[in-house]
Image (cartoon, rainbow, N blue to C red):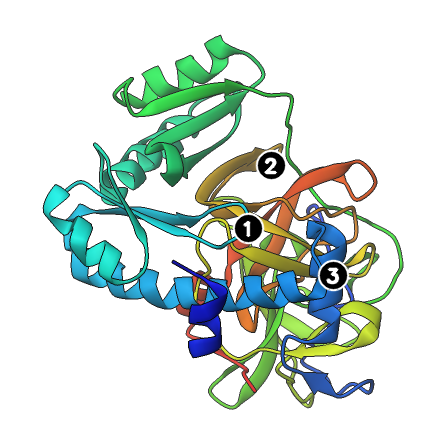
Amino acid sequence: MFSQRSLLAGTALVALCLAGTTTTASAQSGPSPSAPGASMLEALQRDLGLSEQQAVTRLANEERAARADSSLNSSLGEAYAGSWLNGDASRLTVATTDPAQTEAIKAQGARPLVVARTLAQLNAAKDRLDQAAEGAKAGAALWYVDVPTNSVVIKAADQAAGEALAAAAGVDAGTVRVEVSGEQPQPFMNIIGGAAYYIGSSRCSIGFSVTRGSTPGFVTAGHCGRAGARTTNPTGTFQGSSFPGNDYAWVATPGHTPQPWVRGSGGANVIVRGSAQAVVGASICRSGSTTGWRCGVIQQHNTSVRYSQGTVSGLTRTTVCAQPGDSGGSFISGSQAQGVTSGGSGNCTTGGTTYHQPVNEILSAYGLTLRVG
């Protein structure tokens, strides 16, 4: 398992804008960047109720879990059914539909669990819900693949609305679980002046610095602007944008210097080292101009959310809080870029849920290279 011993051994469409991430495509002054250090540890301690040592241990556990999960995802093949960490990230569980694979899972230090459905089957069921939702007028607020329960969860205002979506999709009743919820995700929109970059009178946040060929730029939320829209501070142009369906975009900023940094707590910079996707249950932090540096844990990958503008699919659901003005900016786990803020519900006073668009999908869609340190 992930023990201390093992650790020591080894536009304005809806501007859901998250400004204040210093992963900008322009040269910026400020504190020197650092690896996940003081700022991330302090935020994890504050938001997850951890001691400094617990935060350090958690990050090390999560890094080890990511390596084990990557290896098992490949070796288990079609039988792989997902993975997740427990509450304190001390134990990784890996699910499989093949009982013969349990020893291989144990050999990687993880707990095996034999389940009925593969991750591919769950994703396929969720894809059918996405397709069915396009023609629906109302009902479910969000739906996602929930690997710990080996099911697809639909959250809706009432049971009937959730069941109606499942029926329209023709998904097997045993695969879907409806949960009655008052959650109504909305893009974090703020059409006011502020920090970060601007699209007319709207403001959004820089996600991560990127390049395409020799052209520098940054990724952000798609609802912040359409292709061709102009930005200021830094000056740039939206080269591509997708919303709804997806919620991502990239902005070219010629003449600026892209830096591999995310603004952490107290203005300190955190270096981006890569973009390996963290597993369910891992800690994750978000940087935004309204609420600053906030942390939580990953709840689910591959979530579909219905905004008033339409459904956005393939999002990651987290317990990180956010508020209007906190959109388009960076989600990072350890030193690994995870995605750009899309929207959510709640706030940072009472607590909330926030969704991000995975960064690797954006990089692939536009042929971008993430700026890393």
Apparent side of residue 266 relative to residue 111 in the rendered image (left or right): right
Q: Residue at x 71, y 60 (%)?
A: 51
Q: Nearer the viewer, mark 3 or mark 2?
A: 3
Circles 3 and 2: CB atoms closer than 8 Å: no
Mark with earlier residue (3, 1): 3
Q: Residue furthest top?
A: 160
Circles 2 and 1: CB atoms closer than 8 Å: no
Which image quadrant for residue 31?
bottom right
Where residue 41 appears, x then y in whole percent? 70, 67
**Which residue matches tag 1?**
88
How far apart are labels 3 and 1 at the CA level? 16 Å
How far apart are labels 2 and 1 at the CA level? 37 Å
Q: Residues within 10 Å of mark 3 (few under 14, many from 20)?
A: many
Q: Residue at x 31, y 41 (%)?
A: 123
Tag 1: amino acid: Asp
Q: Residues within 10 Å of mark 1 (few under 14, many from 20)?
A: some
Q: Which mark is residue 124?
A: none
Q: Secondary structure at mark 1?
A: loop
**Which residue matches tag 3?**
43
Tag 3: amino acid: Ala
How far apart are labels 3 and 2 at the CA level? 33 Å
**Which residue matches tag 2?**
309
**How many marks do you count on the picture?**
3
Name the image quarter holding the C terminus: bottom right
> Can residue 373 be seen from the camera position used here?
yes
Q: Secondary structure at mark 3?
A: helix
